Image (spheres, helix red, strand yellow):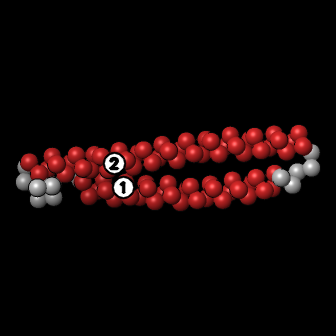
Amino acid sequence: MTSALAIHAGAIILTVMIMGIVLGYTGGIAIDLAGTITDLTFQTATLNFINEAGTLGFSILKFNFLTAIGFIAFGVLGMFLYARYGAGEGAV
């Protein structure tokens, strides 16, 4: 049980890191492309939209990271609970 939680937490952390890299690059590309728009009103609206989308993406990444931290916390708790019953996998 605890090893499965550790694997899941690691998978979520790696996914969050990869998603952060992808979102960072695409956000930077979008800002560069928005800078080439000649109509200043439309350029400002586009940049505001990119900023709002980036804020939403960052919130999703924070939620995923908190999920991974929760998995780690339950894994550590499970290790100490298994130690009482001598299951062999828990902390001594």
If you read the primary sequence from the N terminus, does the residue marked by circle 2 or circle 1 appear first?
A: 1
Q: Residues within 10 Å of mark 1 (few under 14, many from 20)?
A: some
Name the secondary structure under disc 2: helix
On residue 71, which mark appears? 2
Image location (x, y in percent) of residue 76: 24, 50
3 lies left or right of 22: left
59 lies left or right of 14: right
User: Residue beneath label 1, please?
Assistant: 8
Which residue type carries mark 1? Answer: His
**Residue at point 28%, 46% (across, down):** 74
**Residue at point 31%, 56% (across, down):** 6
Q: Nearer the viewer, residue 80 or 87?
A: 80
**Residue at point 43%, 54% (across, down):** 12
Which residue type carries mark 2? Answer: Phe
22 lies left or right of 92: right
The quarter of the displayed image where residue 41 is located: top right
Q: Residues within 10 Å of mark 2 (few under 14, many from 20)?
A: many
**Circles 2 and 1 in contact, beta carbons < 8 Å:** yes
